[in-house]
Amino acid sequence: MRKSEGLGKQRTPDGQEFLAAVRHADVREVLSDHGTFSSAYSTMLTVRGDGDVAAGAAIHLTDPPLHPEIKRAFTPLMTVPAAQRLQQDITERMSELFETIRGRESFDFCEAMITLPMTITGKLMGIPQEKWTVTGRATVRAMGGVDAAQSEMQRRFELFEAHTTIMSVLGDVLEGSPSEDSVSGRCPVTAHAVGDESRDVPLLNAYAFLMGANPTVPQTINQTLILLAGDDDLWSWFTRQEETDQRFVDEALRWASPVNHVLRRATADTVVAGTEVPAGSLVTAWIASANRDEEVFDDPYRFVPDRSPNRHLAFGLGVHRCIGQHVAALGMKTFFDLWRKNVRSVRLDGDPKHLISNFLNGVVYLPLAVTWK
């Protein structure tokens, strides 16, 4: 599709038409123009009809001027200095998690490290540590199915159960007067900004932050571990490094592209790449495709650990570029440093299984055979 002219014209199995931006330049154009391509509807192709229930209230489902007003409440928690202040706690929590698997020669990494993202975001979110396991598992299941043999009814029930679990945990956190140094503690401010008493705006924003943070870090790590376990040259390069630098993290993000696509809705008639886009059209920006664009990345289907420059779009672009990017990058760097420090060798001990989702490029089963130092 990247070799074809214009935007791709697509249709879902149930008949919904949408346009697909798959080239790096086209994805950048769509994501950069929040005025023409609105986020205040939904960011997932699977959500259509009247749009997302959190549209116009959650941080990722609002447009300026409301979006920066909501964002302002959380920005102090997400800066580079703020991320650096979290480093010691993240390292300690992640090291404790490593100790729970140390010595195990064969294990499912996804299950053994189910709380991995919570070692990075748990304290920042204000979620008690005893809730990390159930929250970590629910966030993965809330993104899609894990069993291809499931019926549609079973799949919908599991999604409902996962979302209910998350809402229950976050609801309890918000009712407990969390610290203002946490995301949950600042969520009540969003209610005043939005001014919609018919919805629980603080809960919707707490949910948005949790679901935005938890999938990206572990899935980038999962996809990178698959490479490290199967490529002796890459593993040799990795183990020779004294520490993980930002170039490696950026290439891991480009390679994994945890979020396959984000959805936008055109607010006015426009033209992108020569394709007419009528007002009201749904446009999908395929980040995973943009991160493999041959016009931008040399040898895009090869993992280059020190690739530079690296114009990946894994964190998005424009006003909706991921607010937690610095915290996420720090968490991934910490993990890879600990992995290098603790692991002598690693290989796949079976075939990984992937999340059934067109939104999240996820791994739900990752069998590893590990030799520890």
Image (cartoon, rainbow, N blue to C red):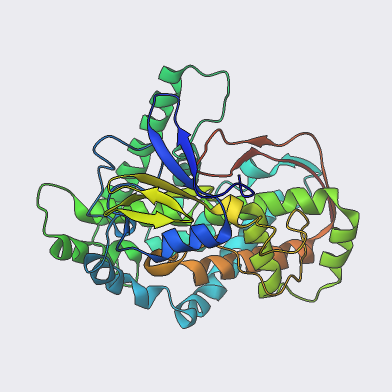
Tell whether 295 sits left or right of 155.
right
Report x, y in % for residue 204: 27, 51
Report x, y in % for residue 122: 45, 59
Residue 369 visible in the current orientation: yes
Q: Quadrant of the N terminus?
A: top right
Report x, y in % for residue 176: 25, 57
Q: Please give the name of the residue rendered at 66% of the width and 67% of the height, measured from the top-left corner.
A: 249
Tell whether 342 sits left or right of 17.
right
Residue 180 visible in the current orientation: no
Q: Is residue 8 above or below residue 353?
A: below
Report x, y in % for residue 37: 34, 56
Tell whether 195 sits left or right of 29.
left
Say which of 318 and 157 sits in front: 318
Looking at the rendering, which quadrant does residue 33 occupy? bottom left
Q: Quadrant of the C terminus?
A: bottom right
Looking at the rendering, which quadrant does residue 142 occupy? top left
Say which of 28 and 158 sits in front: 28
Extreme residue toward the bottom, this view = 81
Q: Is residue 154 above or below residue 244?
A: above
